[in-house]
Image (tube, grey):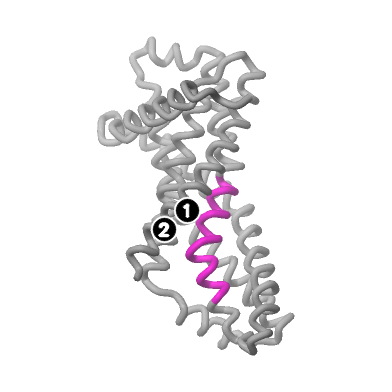
Amino acid sequence: MPLSPTAAVKEVQDVSLLAAKAFGSIFRRPHYVRDILIQMELIGVGSLAVVMLTGFFTGAVLTLQTSKTLSTFGAVGYTGALVAVSLVRELGPVLASLMVAGRVGSGIASELGSMLVTEQINAMRALGTDPIKKLVVPRLLATISMLPVITIVADAMGILGGLFTSVFVLNITPNLYLNRAWDSLRYMDLFGGLLKPLVFGATLAIVSCHCGLRTYGGTQGVGRSTTQAVVASSILIIVSDLFLTRIILAYTR
């Protein structure tokens, strides 16, 4: 069911308020270091397998697709350059973030939603514990810190997948592929490729926590919040990618 304009404005207001409270609580005590480390393990280590597979086969498919076009111009040797730039600038950050959104975003929303409908969060408030400080901030910090690392892994696996395809399918030498890939990358490519995951991670964490903390309707509401978290965070990742790309390209001219 689509949101009315009033409801949409209220959603934006609630998400912005939650983000302000979460970022404002980062430097306040107590610091739940153990919770942060646990979330870093769940988000980072737990997502490695799916991100590595996604990156490897994306790089392999991208190599096949681009080599066919480049062969028209007799420039198959530049396949490594095109694959590396595409992965580092765009595909690596976006695909890694979408994979994490599907795996972690749903988990955050369902966990917080279950805690809300079972009155655990109200009990936490009764004991004098700030739910945002205890529940939202560790997930926010863990997502922001681990998503760039996951993106680097996705980029590396994508370049490796492209190397595998180039050597065994296109008969391109490994040295040619890797040299073209390395020479094509600029510092702004690396900067932009690591800036995007920071923004995507914050967006993913805040939206997922927001969907979880506004759960209603018992267990059925938990499922609804989980779906909304994945859909909303995925859409916002893609939309914010457009604006970030525009800003980064404006400063690289």
Q: Is residue 70 left or right of residue 18?
A: right
Q: Which residue is mark 2?
A: 246
Q: Is residue 106 above or below residue 149?
A: above
Q: Are marks 1 and 2 in contact (CB under 8 Å)?
A: yes
What is the x, y in percent for residue 38?
Answer: 47, 39
Q: Give the Cα separation between the discs numbered 1 and 2.
A: 6 Å
What is the x, y in percent for residue 172?
Answer: 65, 86
Figure quadrant of the N terminus: top right
Q: Which residue is mark 1?
A: 242
Front residue (pair 12, 234): 12
* Quarter residue 21 falls in: top left
What is the x, y in percent for residue 69?
Answer: 67, 78
Front residue (pair 52, 95): 95
Magenta highlight range: 82-100
- Amino acid type of disc 1? Leu
What is the x, y in percent for residue 43?
Answer: 52, 44
Front residue (pair 86, 165): 86
- Amino acid type of disc 2? Arg
| Direction front: furthest residue | 5
As helix, strand or loop, the secondary structure at mark 1 comes to helix
Residue shown at the point (59%, 35%) measured from the top left:
106
Q: Is residue 147 magenta?
A: no
